[in-house]
Image (spheres, rainbow, N blue to C red):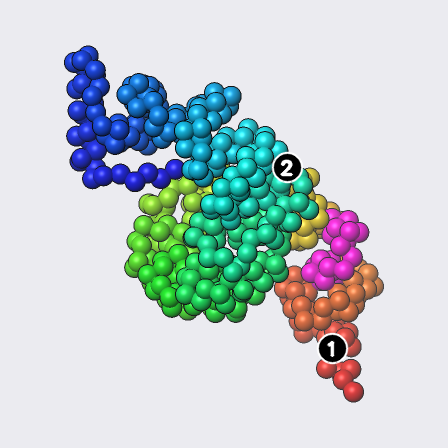
């Protein structure tokens, strides 16, 4: 919750005046505006006991001021006291029944306790006010989604009218609603209509760009974000997002320009530093990458991608002990990331701690045995550990469920041929070539010994699409 406040020094003076009156014990004679500042000060600074005491004093003087009941309900809700919070916010509503903020608060109380049907009732009641209707429509849609009724959630989301001008908060909520309901095309359609209706909405174009990005249409995402920037060239997050899109499209030099601009506009934006570091890492400028990852961590010590990025740099330099320190921190923060867990496994492997490495692979495969890259990496580590039969057996097991995965088949073909299983190896190689000829270099990655083999190269050429053109 954000509060409009006076100058910070003025607020502190008001609070000092209030506390001095408390000590005197002669009664709190202050205006309602002053008491609101006192209550806000305590609430914003997490001094809830003092805030509640100040609220009770305020209600004694101004029993019909709904705002004090509103803040009291916020605190009670945060303390887990749902029934008390509901009773108090209902007093606020009774005093000011046309204030949409109080209905929103009542609904949010029910939501925080997973009482979605009750929250929906409140939001539907609020729609009768004919004020901020879009906000309540979105709230109803999200409640249905959280309650597992996706069909009804979509029906309500479609009630949002793209011809109605939205505030920035509602634009982001609309975008979030479409994302949560996995309605990517509908999201693009909505914001295309919205930006047609309101072409000077920088945030509208931002949302359209994000919509294109969600379906991996990087070109259109960049184009839409450029319109957002054209309207507001100081929108630092738009520059940051454009940089992210360009990274996804492997346009690293252009991405560096955008991210540098984002940082110029807001040098506290840790996300931009992390993305900039990623660009430098991708372009081989490890020194600049390391510098920017470290700046990112100065601003946000809990950024797992920055910790992992530094680990990657040390891995590139074969400084695996240092890499281990940073990757362990990344995994500690983002434990559910398989990607980071796998990088940690690789570091353990390079440090000769094979047991630690294999335990991570076993753990991940137990949770998700349908990820081909896991089998590829794990079997390769076992192969490098000179357990060749087990590496081959593992890949054969993997292709039971991934028989059309060319990467697995190329690796299996290489391992079989390297262990003199010529007939089997050729069979797997032919299957891989038939599935994806363009990835044939993967075979040589695992079996460089066959690069100059005329027999293998002749077999590969049999599957070259160019030889079958009519």
With 140 as the anchor, is 422 left or right in this view? right
Q: Determine the secondary structure under disc 2.
A: loop
Q: Nearer the viewer, mark 2 or mark 1?
A: 2
Between residue 278 and residue 247, name the one nearer to us.
247
Between residue 132 and residue 394, name the one nearer to us.
132
Q: Determine the secondary structure under disc 1.
A: loop
Q: Is residue 300 above or below residue 57?
A: below
Residue most extreme to the bottom: 470
Between residue 197 and residue 10, name the one nearer to us.
197
Q: Which residue sits at x=30%, y=18%?
A: 60
Sequence-earlier tag: 2 or 1: 2
- State the image quarter where residue 285 is shown: bottom left
Residue 449 visible in the snapshot: no
Q: Which residue sits at x=69%, y=60%?
A: 407
Residue most extreme to the top: 25
Of the 4 image quadrants, the one containing the N terminus is: top left
Of the 4 image quadrants, the one containing the C terminus is: bottom right
Judge whether residue 5 is colored magenta.
no
Location of mark 2 (residue): 147
Q: Which residue sits at x=74%, y=77%?
A: 464
Count of marks placed on residues: 2
Residues in magenta?
394-414
Q: Position of residue 219 (x, y in %)?
A: 52, 69
With 119 as the anchor, is 293 left or right in this view? left
With 379 as the anchor, is 163 left or right in this view? left
Q: Position of residue 468 (x, y in %)?
A: 78, 82
Image mark for residue 68? none
Location of mark 1 (residue): 464
């Amino acid at each position: 919750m954000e509060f409009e406040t006076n100058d910070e020094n003025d607020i502190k003076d008001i609070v000092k005046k209030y506390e001095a009156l408390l000590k005197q014990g002669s009664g709190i004679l202050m205006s309602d505006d002053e008491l609101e500042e006192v209550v806000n000060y305590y609430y914003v600074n997490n001094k809830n006991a003092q805030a509640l005491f100040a609220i009770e004093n305020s209600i004694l003087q101004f029993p019909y001021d709904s705002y004090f009941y509103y803040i009291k309900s916020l605190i009670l809700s945060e303390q887990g006291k749902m029934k008390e919070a509901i009773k108090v916010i209902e007093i606020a509503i009774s005093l000011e029944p046309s204030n949409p903020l109080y209905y929103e608060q009542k609904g949010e109380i029910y939501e925080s306790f997973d009482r979605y049907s009750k929250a929906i009732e409140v939001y539907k009641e609020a729609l009768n006010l004919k004020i901020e209707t879009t906000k309540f429509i979105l709230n109803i849609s999200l409640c249905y989604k959280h309650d597992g009724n996706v069909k009804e959630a979509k029906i309500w989301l479609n009630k949002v009218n793209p011809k109605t001008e939205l505030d920035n908060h509602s634009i982001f909520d609309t975008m979030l609603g479409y994302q949560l309901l996995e309605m990517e095309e509908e999201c693009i359609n909505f914001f295309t209509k919205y930006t047609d209706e309101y072409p000077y909405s920088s945030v509208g174009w931002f949302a359209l760009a994000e919509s294109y990005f969600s379906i991996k249409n990087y070109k259109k995402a960049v184009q839409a974000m450029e319109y957002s920037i054209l309207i507001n060239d100081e929108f630092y997050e738009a520059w940051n997002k454009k940089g992210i899109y360009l990274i996804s499209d492997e346009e690293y030099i252009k991405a560096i320009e955008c991210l540098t601009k984002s940082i110029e506009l807001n040098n506290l934006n840790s996300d931009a530093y992390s993305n900039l570091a990623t660009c430098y890492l991708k372009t081989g400028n490890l020194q600049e990458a390391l510098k920017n990852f470290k700046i990112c961590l100065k601003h946000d010590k809990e950024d797992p991608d920055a910790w992992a990025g530094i680990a990657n740099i040390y891995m590139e330099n074969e400084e695996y002990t240092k890499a281990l320190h940073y990757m362990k921190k990344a995994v500690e923060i983002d434990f559910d990331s398989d990607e980071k867990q796998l990088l940690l496994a690789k570091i353990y492997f390079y440090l000769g701690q094979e047991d630690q490495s294999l335990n991570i692979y076993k753990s991940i495969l137990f949770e998700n045995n349908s990820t081909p890259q896991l089998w590829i990496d794990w079997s390769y580590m076992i192969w490098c550990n000179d357990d060749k039969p087990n590496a081959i057996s593992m890949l054969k097991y993997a292709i039971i469920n991934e028989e059309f995965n060319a990467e697995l088949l190329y690796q299996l073909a290489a391992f079989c041929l390297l262990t003199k299983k010529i007939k089997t190896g050729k069979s797997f190689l032919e299957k891989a070539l038939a599935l994806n000829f363009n990835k044939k270099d993967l075979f040589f990655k695992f079996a460089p010994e066959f690069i100059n083999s005329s027999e293998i190269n002749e077999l590969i050429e049999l599957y070259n699409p160019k030889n079958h053109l009519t």
